Image: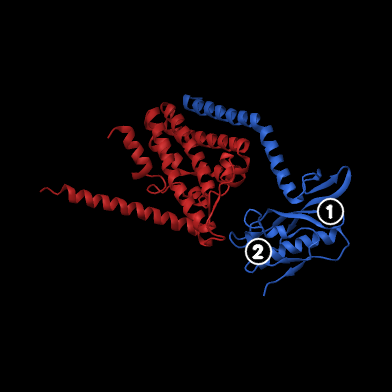
Amino acid sequence: MNDYASIAKDGLWSNNPALVQLLGLCPLLAVSNTFVTALGLGLVTLLVLTAANMIISLLRNLLYDAIRLPIQVLIIATLVTLADIALQSWYFELHQRIGLFVALIVTNCTLLGRAEVFASRNPLLASMVDGITMGLGFLWVLLIMGTVREVLGHGTLFHNFHLLFGAKDVTLHFAETGFLLMVLPPGAFLTLGCLIAFKNYLEMRGRERGKTLSVPG
Amino acid sequence: MNFRQLTLLALTIVSGSLVSGLYGVTRDQINSNREQFEQKQLYAVVNNDSLTLTKVDGAHYLLTDDNSAAGSVTLVTTKAGYNGVITLWVSTDEVGDIRGVRTAAHRETPGIGDIIDRDVSGWIDQFTGSIEQVDIVSGATITTRAVINAVNNHLEDTFTADSFIKEKRHE
């Protein structure tokens, strides 16, 4: 497996920021109650994470120990503020819904974690791939949680989708009311817990199958 | 100053200029977005696009129809809800009939008290015309009663009529 493929596998699955590193739980749990808010925040996180990784990788020769963390935080905070202003300018109604959590991306440890662990030690292209795949890893978990929680909690799917892409309303309705618990924070913990358990189960099964196969005979 | 301090200083200046630069470029757009958004919310309360809104202050707008007065839109608040303050836009015509009511801000329980939010349910659409009764929703009694009382208080303060909205209960 070449370098980039293993970086991608890390971000999307084996070292997934949400399922394995358990970083960025605050925005993950807060915005995953509908599909559209999850998608909106996931995309912003993906963009900011990739940009932060690239910039920090470019500046990695300037990152002396004493000023390393302030610089990383400064870059991340700047990018998040830029994204926040851009959202207000282009997607104002979406910003009304997820604006609070966009600012919280600064505190998403995934960003500082990738900057510190990966981007400050690796070249530009590898850092970009890491940023994109870690961001996508975060995004797919958010989307699954958003889907599950919206269907069970609200009885709808893709509600407010037009806020993001300007097309007409494409909301699917399954039920009049939903299961309240799924909308509230405990629903987020339950969904995430089930996802983590399912991932661990798949990995364990994979390992055992590997064992059986490697038995000489 | 050594090289590290200069690096940090330079990066801070670059970041600061980027943020203020983007803000400068988008400020007008953001302000007009905000105004449009508020107008849209206000016209949803008014229920009539042909009327003209004139801002008196942040909590009070006057409605005119070809220069003749056609009522108002007022921001009404109540602390009688289940959790914190509920803010409502209430629009009336000149004689005290309601044009519409919308919840501007609330912190009622998601899934229970948030039925007063137009995005969640159509409950608030009952406030229209010269209504006499509005449903109290079981499970959300405190919230719905708070909204009805707030609207009543506003009508009482603004008009001398005494035909106020009563609660309707389903047995």
User: In which quadrant of the rendered view does residue B140 lie?
Assistant: bottom right
Question: Which chain identifier belongs to the blue chain?
Answer: B
The color chain A is rendered in: red
Crowding at label 1, few (<14), some or many (≥20) Cα neighbours within 10 Å? Answer: some
| Horizontal relation, residue A67 to residue B140: left or right | left
* Residue B82 badge: 2
User: In which quadrant of the rendered view does residue B111 lie?
Assistant: bottom right
Residue B134, x across and y down, in percent: 73, 65
User: Colour scheme used in the picture?
Assistant: by chain
Q: Earlier in the sequence, mark 2 or mark 1?
A: 2
* Residue A41 badge: none
Please tell me which residue lies in front, B82 or B154: B154
Q: Nearer the viewer, mark 2 or mark 1?
A: 1
- Per the image, the residue denoted by label 1 is B93
| Horizontal relation, residue B77 to residue B163: left or right | left
Can residue A113 be seen from the camera position used here? no
> Do marks 2 and 1 share a subunit?
yes
Residue A42, x across and y down, in percent: 49, 43
Mark 2: secondary structure: loop
Q: Do labels 2 and 1 touch, CB within 8 Å?
A: no
Question: What amino acid type should be assigned to the residue bearing mark 2?
Answer: Tyr
